[in-house]
Structures are given as structure tokens and as C-alpha cells.
Image (cartoon, rainbow, N blue to C red):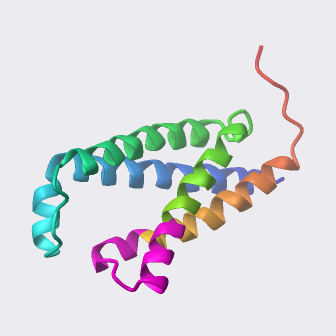
């Protein structure tokens, strides 16, 4: 693996970190506004939005850790892959099977799909490296 690949992997996870941290903070802080702007009926309790928002913040922190040291933290990447695959699956299923997903969720699904592909690439690229665990 080249130094260029390692920089690309770090950049991908820095972007993912910022994306999830900002998205989580927006839904945690401004969820009612966001739902009004997109004319989407909110859930019967904001806790249904706040909990996933906190999870996004948590994953954003994890992605930052991966970005800081991709070789050492490669073991965390499958959790990011599963997060992105889960969201893409839900968006895809509700868009293509039932056709009733509000449009506000779809752009996140597209971005997450490209991140998913990037995470898989990074995981495979990092597998080519011999990692010596930290003491």
C-alpha cells in the first residue's frame, strides 16, 4: 500500500467523521426544524430521532479514530461498513419495495452508499499491510 492510499483512507474517514458528527448534531439540536422544512411528519416522540442522532455522533468519533491511525484501527472499519450497509438497506428497501420513503432521507442513503464502497476499499487495502499491534 502506498502513502497516497493511506492519505486517501485517512481523508475518507475524516470526511465520514465530520459528516456523521454534523448530521448527528443537526438531528439532535434541530430535528423539529428539519422535519418542518422537508414537510415530513415527525415521530410521536423526538427520542426516536435523538437516539440515532447520538449514535451518529458516536460513529463520527469512531471514524475520527480510524482516520487518525487507519492501520491500527482497521478492526473498527467493519462496524462502519455495517452502519452504512444498514442505512442503505433501509433506504433502499423503503424506496424500492414500498415506495413511501420521504425524500429527505434519500440523499443520506446515496452519500452513505459511496462511503460504504470507500470503507470496503479501505478495509481491503489495509489488509495488505502487516500491522504490529500497539503494546
Residue at 17% of width from left, 55% of height from top?
31
Foreground pick, 64 / 83: 83
Find residue 133 and report its image quarter: top right
Q: Horizontal and vertical percent for residue 57?
A: 38, 42
**Residue visible at 39% across and 86% down in the picture:** 99
Horizontally, is 64 left or right of 40 in the view? right
Q: Does the magenta-highlighted stretch encompass residue 59?
A: no
Residue drawn at (50%, 49%) of the image: 14
Vertical placement of residue 3 versus 72, above or below: below
Report x, y in % for residue 135. 77, 13
Q: Is residue 90 left or right of residue 104?
A: right
Where's residue 110, x and y in %? 47, 75
Quadrant of the rendered image containing residue 122: bottom right
Q: Which residues are magenta?
A: 88-108
Which residue is pictured at 45% across the width and 44% down the height? Answer: 60
Residue 67's quadrant in the figure? top right
On screen, 1 above or below 62? Answer: below
Amino acid at each position: 500500500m502506498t502513502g497516497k492510499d493511506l492519505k486517501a483512507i485517512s481523508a475518507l474517514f475524516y470526511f465520514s467523521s465530520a459528516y456523521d458528527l454534523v448530521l448527528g448534531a443537526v438531528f439532535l439540536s434541530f430535528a423539529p426544524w428539519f422535519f418542518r422544512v422537508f414537510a415530513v411528519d415527525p415521530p410521536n416522540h423526538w427520542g426516536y430521532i435523538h437516539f440515532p442522532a447520538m449514535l451518529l455522533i458516536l460513529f463520527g468519533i469512531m471514524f475520527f479514530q480510524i482516520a487518525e491511525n487507519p492501520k491500527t484501527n482497521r478492526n473498527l472499519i467493519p462496524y462502519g461498513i455495517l452502519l452504512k450497509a444498514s442505512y442503505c438497506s433501509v433506504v433502499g428497501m423503503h424506496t424500492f419495495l414500498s415506495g413511501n420513503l420521504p425524500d429527505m432521507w434519500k440523499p443520506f442513503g446515496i452519500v452513505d452508499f459511496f462511503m460504504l464502497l470507500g470503507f470496503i476499499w479501505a478495509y481491503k487495502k489495509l489488509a495488505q499491510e502487516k500491522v504490529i499491534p500497539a503494546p
